[in-house]
Image: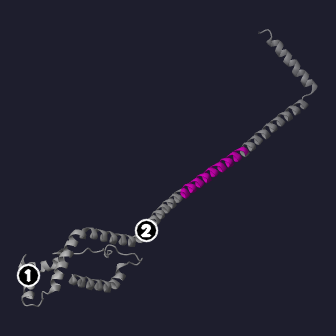
Amino acid sequence: MLSRVALRSAAARQSASTALVARSSATDVAGVRDEKNFPRPVRGEPGKVRLGFVPEEWFQFFHSKTGVTGPYTFGVGLATYLCSKEIYVMEHEYYSGLSLLVMIYVAAKKLGPSISAYLDKEVDAVEAGWNEGRAETIKSLEDAIAEEKKSQWRAEGQELLVQAKRENVLLQLEAAYWERLMNTYTEVKRRLDYQLEKSNLERRLAQRHMVDWIVTNVTKAITPDQEKQTLDRCIADLAALAPRK
């Protein structure tokens, strides 16, 4: 147990010393942590033990050299050597410690699972409390990102609306252009029709005036004798034509 604590404390000091160096590389230019190359630390779980307190690493160390029974042989031989040489004196405290060890073993077997579950629950509750603020921050940032995406979608809709309005204005301008062009055509045609009608009227008036002038002058040129002769000749022609019918 003490060796594991020492190893863990050394690893913790080493990780603390390298944390400052890795902190600059763990974040990019925008200040966001690189989760892929520098994942967040996870709470470690205790390693496996045998006989309640002996680390599994010790047995693995002996297994590669002495086999399966090597660690047990070493432990029994070491205890036998300490006791035989009276390096470890078995006085009354030894038996008190032995009885206390038996009591601790029985208590660990009886109450250990429930206490372990309770302590694990407390540790999980503390860890959840520590991660609650981070989870809320992540949730708020995700909501902000969702709102930003929705705002971008609305902005794209506004761009489509502006484009539709621009096309509508262009159609209105084109309709106004064709309407003005039609008005210009109508006005020009009306004025041309007016000029044509004016020319026709002037020509008819000139023809009528000329006819009246010719008739008047011819009438003035005919004397009463010529008129009487012409009338007699007409009567004679009519009389000559009457028997033929």
Q: Which label is found at residue 136?
A: 2
Q: Tell me if I can see residue 48 in this picture.
A: no
Q: Which label is found at residue 159?
A: none
| Residue ID at (35%, 79%) | 26
Given residues 140 and 169, the one toward you in this image is 140
- Residue 82 lies in what quarter of the image? bottom left
Q: Is residue 189 in the magenta section?
A: yes
Q: How many tags in the picture?
A: 2
Q: Which residues are magenta?
A: 161-190
- Residue 121 lies in what quarter of the image? bottom left
Q: What's the distance in space between the residues labelled 2 and 1, CA to CA?
A: 56 Å
Left or right of residue 181, residue 200 in this image: right
Residue indicated by mark 1: 76
220 vs 81: above or below: above
187 vs 126: above or below: above
Label 2 residue SS? helix
- Residue 81 lies in what quarter of the image? bottom left
Given residues 156 and 114, the one toward you in this image is 114
Crowding at dot 2, Cα within 10 Å, few <14 / some 14-19 / many 20+, comes out as: few
